[in-house]
Image (tube, grey):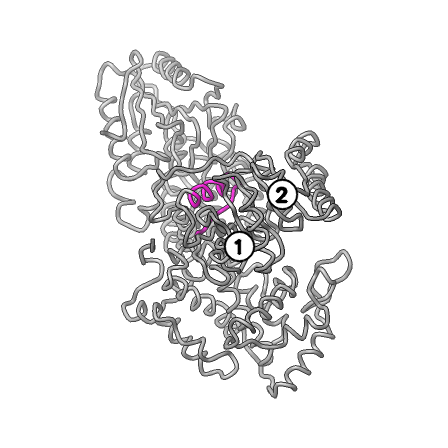
Amino acid sequence: MSTAESSREGTIAVIRFGEPPVNSFGAVTRRDLTEAIETAIADSAVTAIVITGRNGLFSAGADIKEFSSAAVMAAPNLLNLITAIESSPKPVVAAIEGTCLGGGLEVALGCHYRVALESAKLGLPEVKIGLLPGAGGTQRLPRLIGVEAAINVILGGVPVPAKLFKGTPLLDAVVADDLIGAAVKLAAAKAAARKPGEPLPQARRLTVRDPDAEALLGFARTTVTATYPNFPAPAKCLDAIEAAVTQPFDQGLATERRLFGELMLTPVSRALRHAFFAERAAAKIADVPDSTPVRPIKSAAVIGAGTMGTGIAINFLEAGIPVMLLEVGQAALDKGVARVREVYAGQVKKGRLKPADAEAKARLLTPTLSYESIKNADIVIEAVFEEMSVKEKVFTTLDQVMKPGAILATNTSTLDIDRIAAVTKRPADVIGTHFFSPANIMKLLEVVRGKATAKDVLASTMKLAKTLKKTAVVSGVCDGFIGNRMIEQYSRQALFMIDEGASPAEIDAAVEKFGFAMGPFRMSDLAGNDIGWHIRKRRAIEQPEVIYSTIADKLCELGRFGQKSGAGWYDYKAGDRQAYVSPVVDALIGAHRTAIGVKPRSLDAREIVDRLVYALVNEGAKLLAEGIAARASDIDVVYLTGYGFPVWRGGPMRYADEVGLYGVAQRMRELARNPYGDPGFWTPALMITDLAASNGAFNTMGARS
């Protein structure tokens, strides 16, 4: 079956193209659509052509899976297709519905006329994967909507409602319904009105007429230099738009292609493309096919009305799912409900939400003190204190009261899901849903699969994650799962470096310059230093062989738990979250070094970054070997969406691939010579040495089931 099929509406050929799910312009679609257009041109009974996408959308653009292969330029490439459309002797009308993005919009820009549904969305999102529109988008769009609007569309990279382009040369008509009828009518009218030899309108023939173009481009350059210092694509986009202003079309098109090729080779674009595919791969589970039946989730309950519990509840409210919020005491419950209302009041104050809409969302929340009242919920998520005995008590009760088929989820960040499931008579219904704080804002959701978790429970939870607009990554059961198990090694090295001579501010500054959103000590102050203290106390009993610096414990013994106590690794002022270097902490660290007999030394930024990042990588390799993480790219997604790893580096495992695993292993062996950084930890994981020996990479490995 062809990916482009023609039908006739009188003398108008209507060509519907594309393959599910997004009608991308892969090599086969490009060929089939080009041939269909050529056939229509050759048919003397056809006076004009309408092209439109299948499946309720035009096209999401080029097939970026081809970008790493020769297929991307296989003839007919996207430029060849657009040339075939633009040079057609018969009018070609693009009928646009759904999404029309990237190469899809570039194809539409090559048409002589364009008609869109009001609900359609148009955009050029290439900047989000470190590229620029490479098939004429930077040249045609400024000619149709002007320089300022083109800058906003191309640098913004987000879909724009078609109705905003109504009245511009970009769209000849914007209609509420009957898209094909409107496009056929326009095509017929244009064909009938055209005089013999009269040229058809082409965007390439237009001249950019904008007296403020130079000033607009200059202002945009200043903005992107300040806002995107590590991303080359925005500046290159501006170079290409400038070419549309200053160069003839064909010369500008050549400039665009040159800039596109340069960006394709940058580590940043490779990392961003990796992140794009990694997020989509994370939704795939090898032994849980897409056809797996799912349990309906039309109501939810959350146990615990603290910061985490209320944040989780808000996710359901935002999705329009009624949620019951359960606490053991009225005061705590009232405080939780007030916290939810404060969130919505803040959105109303900022103009993000209408008062009536905020009230409608809040009405979906039912506070309760009774387990009996939540028994009919389709899913219940426990978000109580991180203590096994407390969790076990909650799940024993849930097992007794919840209806058959309800999903029993725990929000634990470190504890053994299988042990929690074992206190129930239905371990197949138990799953981990590790939200990240603040739960109503953070995108990541670690879905923890227990040894008994049923496949339909896993599939249902992954579907729920999409409903809640979360990026879900599946983890196996281990202490800390993917994210927190790795961050523990990162934090251990940060504390060892304090022992050795670095200050919290020096360590934070080095890793933030590398690109992390926040260094380890500012992050700990934000999360609460008592959380790590609690975990270390548990480790001392369960894993006494694990080596820790004692400096963090000494800090907590002073009651310096971070921002919530007004003091942690840094000092804080009332109403001010800025971290101020603390003389108290400086003195504490000095006394600690004396007590452990360490003469402080200077640590440079390279050592700080390598120890922190490669600690993540080494532990990540162990998680892969153990099957806790299915793919290296899943680990990258966890760190990009939950831990502030710089997106332009693609995640810790992708970064290690970019450096080269031979060099990574070599550096780890160097770090093992340091007697204070737990030398045993720095033995490279077997997976690293094996891949290094074969010039392999984490992200070329297949996913584990």
Q: Residues within 10 Å of mark 1 (few under 14, many from 20)?
A: some
Depicted 12 relative to depicted 375: above or below? above
Q: Quadrant of the N terminus?
A: top left
Inspect the image, locate mark 1, and give the three-letter code of the amino acid beneath it: Gly
Give the image location of residue 415, x and y in percent: 53, 60
For image coordinates 45% across by 75% down, the residue present is 681
Evaluate whether residue 222 shows in this view: yes
Q: Which residue is mark 2?
A: 371
Evaluate whether residue 239 shows in this view: no
Q: Pointer 1 and pointer 2: residues touching (CB < 8 Å)?
A: no
Depicted 295 relative to depicted 442: above or below? above
Label 2 SS: helix
Mark 1 against mark 2, which lies toward the viewer?
Answer: 2
Depicted 117 relative to depicted 472: above or below? above
Label 1 SS: helix
Tell me the magenta residue range.
457-474
Q: In this view of the protein, which residue sits in the foreground, 595 or 107?
A: 595
Depicted 122 relative to depicted 231: above or below? above
Q: In this view of the protein, which residue sits in the foreground, 98 or 439?
A: 439
For image coordinates 49% across by 41% down, the residue present is 464
Q: Which residue is mark 1?
A: 642
Query: Could you tell me how far apart the alpha carbons at marks 1 and 2 are, in whole angstroms?
Result: 32 Å
For image coordinates 63% across by 73% down, the residue present is 552
**Residue 471 colored magenta?**
yes
